[in-house]
Amino acid sequence: MQHEHHRVPVTALAFLQQDILLAGEGSYLNAYDGRSRLLKSVRIFDRQAIHGIVVCGEIVLVWGGSSIRNLYVNITTEGDLTLTSGSVQSVGDWILDAAFASTCEGPGVAGIVTAHNALWLVKIFSTSTTGCANATKLERLLPGSKCILYSAHIQRLSSSTCLIASGTAFGDIIVWSATLTADGDTFSTQCQTHFTFSAHEGSVFGVHIASPLTLPASVTSSRVLASCSDDRNIKLWDISDLSTRCAAPTEVQRDTGFGSEPENSTGLAPSCLARVMGHVSRIWHVRYELSASGSELGRVVSFGEDASVLTWAVGEKDGSSDLPYALEKVDVIGAHSGKHIWSVALNDSGSIATGGADGAIAICSRTQDTETAKEIPLALIDQSPGGDNFRAYCFVNIDTFVATTDHGCIGVVKVTPGPGLPSVTEISGPVSGLRGYSVIASVESVAFIAGTDGAVFSYDRRSDQLSKLIHVDGKIAGLFTCDNSTSGIALLITTVGKPSAELLLLDLSPGDAALIVTKTSQMNLPQGWIVTSFDSHVGADTTTRYVALGSRSGAIAIFVTDEGTASGVIDCSLLIETVHGREAVTTLNWARQGPVAEPSDWIFSTGRDGTLAVHQVAVHDGQMKLHLVHQLSLPFGPNIEGLDLARECRLTVWGCKSKHFIVYDIASQREVMSIECGGAHRNWAYQPTENGGTFLWTKASKLYRRTQSALPYELLNHGSHGREIKSAAVSSAPWERQIVATGAEDTDIKLFKLEREGFKCLQTIRRHNTGIQHLQWSDDGQYLFSSGGFEEFFIWKISSGVPYIDIGVTCVSKHPRSGASDLRIMGFEVDVEAVSMIESSSPCLRITMAYSDSTLKLWRYQEETWKLLVAADYLTACINHVLGLDESSSAFITAATDGHVAHWEHNTQKDQLRWTRRHKVHQNAVHAATFCSLADGSILVITGGDDNAIGVTWIASPEHETTTLLIPRAHAAAVTGLATVRVGKCTYWLASAGIDQRVKLWEISVDVTFAGVEGITVRRLQDVFTAVADVSSLDVCRLEGGGLGIVVCGVGMDLWRLPSAGRDQ
């Protein structure tokens, strides 16, 4: 087997020459350039993930567990990078940190601290012939102590002295130094402990010794230690006085348990400078950095289990603190999904790289000029006494917006980057119809304004003129606009209490010509309809105009009118209820995409139910239909307020989550912009740009704006799940349309496409409320089935070729008992009844479900109707797997936690389901099961158990005895994943994986002339290490070029290419 790609937790990061990032992904060291391009990938360890990387010039030291390995880096003038590896050595204890001496001239010398606070020295020699760092010498300088460390940091004080901070499992911190004296090739060491103190109420997961800095009221340089813990506290300590002496750690440290003494009770603790509680869970890393902007005290950056990066400004104490300094949160970045930021790297140019459990690598710049929120003074528009407030506003350009006030004034505001005030032009004094109430809408260069008296005004930015456009009867309820390059501007006007709306078609002539109304139509709205969104589109025949309206009740209505007719009345042609449940449809966007010869029309919509929906428009014999091809919940909301399709075929949506305004990129599945504005219930306006945009919002009767022109972080590779994957399934489509579905403990289902560069996530399904238990595709790849806890079961329809999002996903149905109990649907088998394809366009499915309470149920589903056909009990063991043996759903095999496989039969005449045979295979639970059908009608059931064994069970007719060929110790831990490939008439390849992180390839040969397992021969072909921990599932996939591969899923994803069937092993 050949390793192809993986997406596993990133457990180590280090910068090489500022612009190259080294990443430890499993056992591989990957080098990326600043353009997210993979330069080189080298396997460092055979059976160990990388946990740390340090760089000194051209020498790189990599460690994982107790193993270390050195590399020599060579970058040619053409920019090509080569990595030459030395030998692997072991220090016999878990390595926590390493640091090189101040220079790397001659042999590279580095110190290593282990989990028992031992200090090791590693010397790296260059061979005279190659110049490569491939000779390493290890020497233990100081023995360890009884204490168990969870963190350590080494900082060089000089070429011979280093300062070490060690954080223990029981909340203590030890600060000590070591001085090295060289006598030829021999080193001697003097050690001194400076501080030993109780620092936290939880395990100390991160310590960092900052570079010297000058604190206020201090004439000498100070040294600060930052620490973090699972008590969620970040603390700063003054460890400047290294003349302090205390007893060795073995004399004062507790053997176990957390102490109750306060921080300074022992007299050995440094003074605490600042303390703050941050993150919503444990904090893994902390860094104290001098501010790139020249701030005297610098900033603290913390990295948590909640997958967020928090930046804290160090400042003078506030009135509520008894400590001399305070930490104030100034920035939050959430670049990773799920849990855990496992690795951190910082460089001198101001970049922070983070690696998460989701397999993503994010880089953000500390020196990036992030604009803060700025208030726009109302006095710039209205200086009248008595006070005034901004009422409504909208953009007419990327940096210009039109605003109205409570007094009815109208002004144009042009915002500019930087600290200066915006330029303001008042285009109208108080207008009586706009006093106390106004609505506003805009397209590029034109704004429309209306109020209580029915007058609608237009403002043209080109001529800087305000004019009255039209007058309607009644108070204006809403203005809605759309601008189509081929059909001009359309304006929809709704009035309070009126059952119709006015549609105006406008011509914006070139130059400074006035806006002209070319056509006016009256649209009869459905009963009780309140318009919340609008779009208009001219059909391919250029004579038919389609108008789409969204309502407050979640419905979409389509109106059709002839472009050539005069003004008139238009009735609703198509009404679709509850597109977005009972919540408002906030945005509609009609787009034409597809091949030039046969483009298709699509309607994109968002709603306050938190979903994005896509409908395909079909017209047959003059009748229009909308087919829902995509509707999924987004990771923020539920107030999804808008979308944009205008930029480079990118689909971005925006809305509010809690107190933040979020802009989200659908294709890359990442946040583009996040602004704390106070929440959705306020006036706001947003003007999108490629990497952000300008956001206006009202808070506490004041108007604020913020502009973003650069992404808050860059992603070198996009991650997958933030929790362990529990199930995976690969569709049976060809390689170019093949989809890998994964379901994880984070309750998400992700759909991946296999590309040359690796796994690309196409969609994330967020519907389950519990971890996913099982996934299965239909044979044609059009339907995906998923199950979880609480009896959750969903049927998903997958559609390809959807513009902007590639594939569409809709929920066809959910099981009627979903959420009804705490039972888990552990596994299921789905069969399609052939008769259904003739009688109905909707498939008729027979679904056999295995429950955690040892029951088996057979359901029929068709056209939103579920019917329980039959149910049966097993014993008391949980049924983990169910395998269907024929298309008629009359015979099944189940595997349970009692180690048995059972044969079930469904008697349709008696409407009875029962198990007929039961056979012992494993000592305890069966974790994986699959089967192969043989030429003589018998089957091989292959199982993996908690007893580390693989069982090959031969099952034939009832008159034949069921027998098992057991492979004991097939793995060193439980076997949790199995997949088979047929390579000959009676020959199969079996791929197996277990908790031991080994993937093994077996060949199973069957001689059907022998009964039972006498004719079965099994031999192991290959045994490889996978970086995926807690493997849960395997599946076979197609690879580019016609080959086959194995997808390994657990804590991450791994892809292995299988050898050709005829290749000599």
Image (cartoon, rainbow, N blue to C red):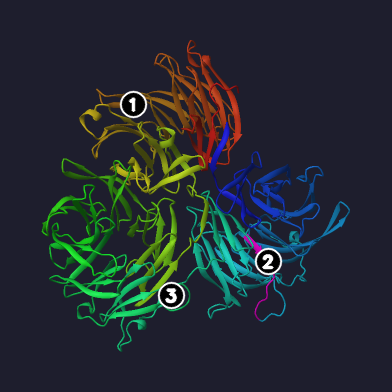
Could you give the CA–CA distance between mark 2 and mark 3, rounded to whole angstroms? 45 Å
Q: Is residue 342 left or right of residue 760?
A: right
Q: Quadrant of the N terminus?
A: top right
Going by the numbered disc 1, the residue's amino acid type is Arg
Q: Is 139 part of what is drawn in magenta?
A: no
Sort mark 2 into few (<14), some (14-19) or many (20+) by Cα contacts within 10 Å. many
Residue at which label 2 appears: 197
- Whether residue 817 appears in this view of the structure is no
- Which region of the structure is painted magenta? 206-216
Q: Is residue 83 above or below residue 987?
A: below
Judging from the image, what secondary structure is the residue with disc 3 in?
Answer: strand
Judging from the image, what secondary structure is the residue with disc 2 in?
Answer: strand
Q: Quadrant of the C terminus?
A: top right
Q: Residue at x 70, y 73 (%)?
A: 222
Residue at which label 1 appears: 914
- Closer mark to the observer between disc 1 and disc 2: 2
Task: Choose the circle earlier in sequence order: 1 or 3.
Answer: 3
Residue at which label 3 appears: 374
